[in-house]
Structure formats: C-alpha cells, structure tokens
Image (tube, rainbow, N blue to C red):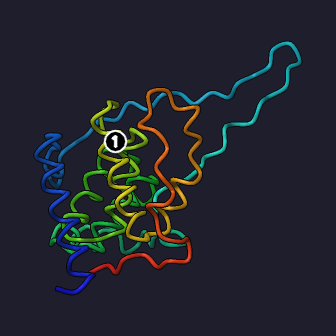
C-alpha cells in the first residue's frame, strides 16, 4: 500500500474512532437553523492612562486558500458540497468560519470541515483539529482540546507544515492544564511537504 493511501486510511480511521469516542454529532443538515451567541468583543483599556491596548496577536488560523470566495457562485458551491464533494465542503466551511458569502457560524464551519475530513481532505482535517483545540464551534472541554491536539500533532508528525507551524507558535506555559509541549524530535523538518489531498 502506498504512503498516501496509508495516510488516508489512518486519517479516516482516526476520524471515525474520534467521532464515536467523543460523540461528535453528524454534520448539520441543509436548512437547519443554528443560533450562535457571539460574545461582545471589547478591547482592554488602561483607565489610568486612557491608552487602548491592542488586541492579542492571533497565533494561527485555519488553512484556507488566499483571497476571498466568489460569492456569486456560492449557491452552486453549497450544492456541490451537499453532493459530497470534499473540496466544496471545505470551501463552504471556510465561508461559515469567515462569515463570507453567508452568516458567521463556527458550528457550521466545524461541521463542514469534519464532513470534508471524512472524505480525506487534509486541510479540512487540520481545520477541524484546529477548531477543536481552540474551542471554536465545539464545546469547550478537555475532550475536544485533546482530540484537536491529537489531530494537529499527528499531522505534524506526517510533515504537514501548517500543523508544524501551529505547534511551534503555541506558548504552552500560558495554557493552564494543557497537555504539554510535544516533543519536537517527533516531527519532520519544516521543509517537508504536506500529505497529498484527494479532491
């Protein structure tokens, strides 16, 4: 069995086992309404000096193609995603994550990324792990944190560059109760290519 097929098989098995173990729900169906409570974002203000402190630096984000999605073709993209096209599922997930061409919903983004990941889309698999690790669109608990961390470290061990970069940017000392910093010797050099995706 070739290496890409082994990687695809490992990813599929990990997703299925993880969904069963962590009781991850099936992807949300078409026309199903989801209400998202978004907290008000406020900047810290130093009252004494009346100086506005900058927002914290975002260390990483999902993997997405450069530029914006074409909103004029978004309805067709959704139809393709509903037809089980992994690349379309991935792009619809990006749209919901960014709130581009549709409303913002981390829950729907996670659902679409997970669906694409089950079809062996590596970028979507990383994005679902990233969202679990950052508690975006999933319950904020240790089970999801661990599952997301496992996905990211597994991909890093296979040479997937965004996962390697993400793990190198985390300040583990500031994350209370975190699983601990992974051993960097487990990962391939940063010049490695990401695993092949099936489209």
Q: Is residue 183 above or below residue 68?
A: above
Name which residue lies at 49% across and 69% down: 161
Q: Which residue is mark 1?
A: 137
Seen in the image, is 68 located left or right of residue 104?
right
Q: Residue at x 23, y 71 (%)?
A: 120
Nearest the eye: 106 or 2:
2
For this orientation, the residue located farthest to the front is: 185
Extreme-right residue of the structure: 49
167 and 124: which one is in front?
A: 167
Which residue of the protein is positioned furthest toward the left in this rendering?
A: 20
Q: Is residue 35 above or below residue 194?
A: above
Residue 150 shown left or right of residue 21 in the figure: right
Residue 95's spot in the image, x, y percent?
Answer: 40, 60
Q: Residue at x 25, y 72 (%)?
A: 86
Residue at the outermost bottom position: 2
In the image: residue 83, left or right of residue 169: left
Q: Is residue 43 above or below residue 75?
A: above
Q: Position of residue 141 (x, y in %)?
A: 32, 30
Q: Secondary structure at mark 1?
A: loop
Q: Quadrant of the C terminus?
A: bottom left
Which quadrant would residue 114 be assigned to in this image? bottom left
**The N terminus sits in image quarter:** bottom left
Figure disc tally: 1
């Amino acid at each position: 069995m070739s290496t890409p097929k082994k990687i695809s098989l490992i990813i599929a098995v990990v997703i299925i086992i993880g969904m069963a173990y962590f009781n991850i729900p099936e992807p949300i169906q078409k026309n199903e309404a989801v209400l998202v409570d978004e907290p008000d974002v406020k900047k810290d203000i130093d009252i004494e000096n009346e100086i506005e402190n900058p927002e914290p630096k975002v260390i990483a984000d999902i993997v997405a193609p450069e530029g914006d999605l074409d909103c004029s073709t978004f309805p067709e993209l959704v139809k393709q995603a509903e037809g089980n096209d992994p690349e379309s599922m991935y792009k619809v997930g990006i749209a919901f994550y960014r709130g581009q061409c549709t409303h913002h919903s981390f829950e729907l983004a996670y659902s679409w990324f997970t669906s694409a990941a089950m079809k062996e889309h590596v970028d979507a698999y990383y994005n679902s792990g990233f969202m679990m690790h950052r508690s975006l669109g999933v319950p904020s608990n240790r089970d999801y944190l661990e599952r997301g961390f496992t996905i990211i470290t597994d991909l890093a061990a296979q040479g997937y560059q965004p996962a390697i970069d993400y793990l190198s940017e985390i300040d583990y000392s500031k994350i209370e109760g975190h699983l601990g910093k992974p051993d960097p010797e487990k990962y391939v050099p940063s010049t490695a290519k990401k695993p092949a995706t099936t489209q």
